[in-house]
């Protein structure tokens, strides 16, 4: 084999890897710049007139502007660090460090599974060291400046320590099991690893709310009262199998408010954030006033009972339309395709005319070699390179090419698609709430939560399509009004 040609291909692999990282970053920067420009607008959009004040609108924009400027700055730091990391041979160096760490335990480089687990821990530690200063600044400067941060430095630190150990504990069996399956499964590993991931996801979704979340937050059952009865009435009306009703102390960390439900089958739990209405949900009750909440509004979002019920009406919409299962299906399909293509790369089969003609794709050996892995080809490294690097995968996919190397460009399309699906579900859940007669209250609650959270009220559409899982307030209000008039017209017709 002519080594000159090989080295050319190897060099091109690394250059392409970095090129795609820079292109991804540039695309996101472009979206952010658009959004930043949009946030500089001073005029209240027509849809929001009479709903939020100009002052609220400007304050929300100022908060989003602060966040996005910071994001642009930190992604600039990140991309620079990434380029240096790969150019300096960081991947190989970390792989070697992970071996040094397991040697005292009696393992050698023959134990790829153990070395991979060690490698992931090293990689995770690196990411914490990189992100901690940025996270600290975000929490204690930006969130603080806009009045959202409720964390103390020690709480933040404890969260980091807990998360680290938790990730290590969860990562260990997942990585070890995954690598084992990929090695053991041969050419059909993609199906086995996918099944393994599906089981992991289901297990994680079961233990997350019951075992993991309580490590970070306190969940207390909602006390008896008019709110509880109203929610139970709602659940009964829709045959929603509500087993437990909790209040979570969202206010200890942040005052962004929310509500959600979880649990499979006939065992559903609803969680309300105390920030929806502190006093209604049993916090900071003042002067022993009644808890009907009709007239009393606290320092939180101050949602009234009927508004909280309307929010749950929206959540029930997610349940009635089986959104969780549909989302799981989309995510699992994505994963199946991902692993299938990774299998193609790892067990590269046959030549490809297009690749040979362009000389821009390489064999797996060449791709590993580009990052310093000359003799060894660890699965975990292949997985990292495959998911981060890319060359015209979409095109290759269309041409059913057998030499697929990476999925990064495709992942951006996947992200657009997944956000699109979630947004459709949000609209659908809103329509459900409107159909159940909660439209007005839901609109009022959304306005309260959005202004209290200083949410992005009217974002740039492209930025929003890529970054937001929820439509903006303007879009939601517009859609709800439209649906309400459709229903009204339908009713008139039938009468
Ligand atoms: Zn929703």
Image: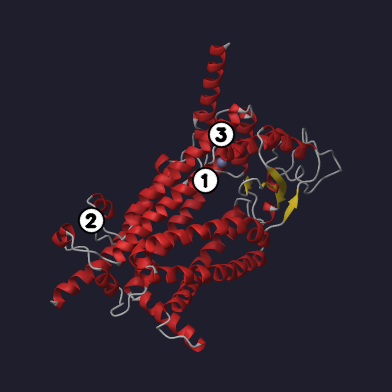
Give the side of residue 164 with respect to residue 293, left or right: left
- Badge nearest the viewer, 1 or 3: 1
In terms of secondary structure, where does tag 1 sit?
helix
Position of residue 288 measured from the top left corner of the image (x, y, whole percent): 86, 43
Give the side of residue 312 with respect to residue 8, left or right: right
- Label 3 beta carbon less than 8 Å to ligand 1: yes
Q: CA distance from mark 2 to mark 1?
A: 32 Å
Residue 14 in sight:
yes
Q: Which residue is mark 1?
A: 325
In terms of secondary structure, where does tag 3 sit?
helix
In the foreground, 133 or 322: 322
Q: Earlier in the sequence, mark 2 or mark 1?
A: 1
Determine contact: label 3, label 2, CB under 8 Å. no
User: Residue 236 has which mark?
Assistant: none
Position of residue 133 measured from the top left corner of the image (x, y, whole percent): 53, 66
Q: Which residue is mark 2?
A: 401
In the foreground, 208 or 448: 208
Position of the N terminus by quadrant: bottom left
- Label 1 beta carbon less than 8 Å to ligand 1: no
The residue that appears at 29% across and 67% down in the rendered structure is 347
Residue density around tag 1, few if under 14, some if 14–19, many if 20 or more, within 10 Å: few
Q: Which residue is mark 3?
A: 430
């Amino acid at each position: 084999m002519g080594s000159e040609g090989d080295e050319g291909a190897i060099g091109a692999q690394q250059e392409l890897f970095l090129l795609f990282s820079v292109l991804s970053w540039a695309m996101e920067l472009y979206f952010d710049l658009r959004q930043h420009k949009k946030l500089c607008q001073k005029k209240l959009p027509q849809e929001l007139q009479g709903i939020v004040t100009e002052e609220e609108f400007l304050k929300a924009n100022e908060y989003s502007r602060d966040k996005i400027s910071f994001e642009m700055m930190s992604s600039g730091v990140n991309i620079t660090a990434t380029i240096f990391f790969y150019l300096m041979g960081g991947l190989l160096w970390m792989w070697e460090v992970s071996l040094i760490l397991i040697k005292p335990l009696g393992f050698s480089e023959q134990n790829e599974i153990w070395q991979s687990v060690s490698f992931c821990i090293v990689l995770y530690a690196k990411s914490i060291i990189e992100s901690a200063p940025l996270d600290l600044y975000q929490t204690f400067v930006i969130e603080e400046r806009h009045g959202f941060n409720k964390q103390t430095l020690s709480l933040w630190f404890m969260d980091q320590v807990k998360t680290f150990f938790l990730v290590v504990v969860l990562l260990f069996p997942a990585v070890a099991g995954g690598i084992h399956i990929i090695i053991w499964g041969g050419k059909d590993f993609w199906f086995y690893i996918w099944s393994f991931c599906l089981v992991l996801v289901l297990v994680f979704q079961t233990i997350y709310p019951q075992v993991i979340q309580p490590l970070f937050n306190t969940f207390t059952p909602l006390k008896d009262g008019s709110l509880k009865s109203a929610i139970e009435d709602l659940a009964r009306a829709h045959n929603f199998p509500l087993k437990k009703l909790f209040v979570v102390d969202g206010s200890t960390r942040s005052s962004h408010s929310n509500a959600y439900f979880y649990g499979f089958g006939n065992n559903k739990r609803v969680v309300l954030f105390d920030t929806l209405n502190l006093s209604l949900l049993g916090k900071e009750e003042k002067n022993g006033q009644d808890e009907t909440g009709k007239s009393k509004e606290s320092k939180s979002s101050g949602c009234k009972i009927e508004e909280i019920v309307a929010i749950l009406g929206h959540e029930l919409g997610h349940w009635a339309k089986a959104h969780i299962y549909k989302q799981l299906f989309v995510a699992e399909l994505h994963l199946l395709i991902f692993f299938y293509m990774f299998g193609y790369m790892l067990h590269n089969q046959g030549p490809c005319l297009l690749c040979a003609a362009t000389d821009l794709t390489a064999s797996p050996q060449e791709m590993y070699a580009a990052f310093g892995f000359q003799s060894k080809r660890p699965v975990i490294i292949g997985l990292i390179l495959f998911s981060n690097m890319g060359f015209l995968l979409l095109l290759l996919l269309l041409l059913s090419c057998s030499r697929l190397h990476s999925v990064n460009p495709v992942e951006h399309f996947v992200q657009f698609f997944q956000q699109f699906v979630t947004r459709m579900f949000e609209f659908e859940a809103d329509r459900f709430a409107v159909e159940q007669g909660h439209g007005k209250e839901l609109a009022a609650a959304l306005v309260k939560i959005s202004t209290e959270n200083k949410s992005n009220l009217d974002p740039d559409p492209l930025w929003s399509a890529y970054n937001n899982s929820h439509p903006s307030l303007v879009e939601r209000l517009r859609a709800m009004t439209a649906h309400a008039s459709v229903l009204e017209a339908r009713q008139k017709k039938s009468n």
